[in-house]
Amino acid sequence: MSRRNLNDADFSLMSKVAVLSAFSRDEIVSMTNGTTVVIYNGRELLFSEGEPAEQFFIVIKGQVRLFRILGDGRVALFHLVSAGESFAEAVVLSGQKYPVSAECDPGSQIIAISRLQLVNRLRNDKAMIGRMMQSLIERERFFYRELNDLRQRSPSQRLAGFLLSQSDDAEIVPKHVIANRIGVTPETFSRALRKLEDDGFIARDTRMSILDVEGLRQFSRR
């Protein structure tokens, strides 16, 4: 594990994160004074389910898995957090405990902002509270629209949307992770994958390489 100071690119990315998007650059700089970017060399646990929520996080580079270990020992993946996204801000603001565990991939670069930093900043500027709450409400609306969209789309369309969202140089995501991400069983995932292959949208390879981008995009929106 190593650390580096925040740079202009980091502040630009943070300004686009929902919980901070209503703030000016100067306000973000003030709130994150003394904060560094932590670079994780290996796969590391950021926090465990049930721990007090003392920090929320912003992913600068890499990926974070939010998961819960079930009673029978199985691991249930709740969400994959990618670069440019934040997580745990809601539980930090409410003073609750982390409802899931979080583990980052090797090479991830992550900013942690403490509850104390956030609360102190909000106390000094009450107008910030309203702007932050508005940002969080807009984010919740986005997730609601996304959930509603997923309910209306077939598994094959959900898979198509996921593949279109991945960059060409992105790491290969395990198929069981994708199945969790789009909310389907492994069996349903296999059928969805076979349909996209049979229709000529993607290749039969480990990367599920897209052969027909425009066709896949139109299919995902039907």
Image: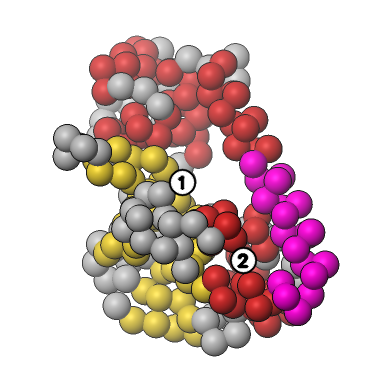
Image height of 200 relative to 147, above or below: above
**Horizontal and vertical percent position of residue 190:** 28, 19
Q: Secondary structure at mark 1?
A: loop
Quadrant housing residue 14 = bottom right
Front residue of 117/33: it is 117
Tell me if residue 62 can be seen.
yes
Q: Is residue 94 left or right of residue 82?
A: right
Q: Give the residue number, with chain letter if any, for mark 1.
A: 167
Q: Is residue 15 left or right of residue 173?
A: right
Point 35% across, 32% down: residue = 180
Q: Give the residue number, with chain letter if any, for mark 2.
A: 14
What amino acid is found at the position of numbered circle 1 in the picture?
A: Ser
**Horizontal and vertical percent position of residue 147:** 56, 28
Dominant secondary-structure state across the stretch colored magenta: helix
Quadrant housing residue 27 = bottom right
Q: Read off the magenta span.
A: 122-140
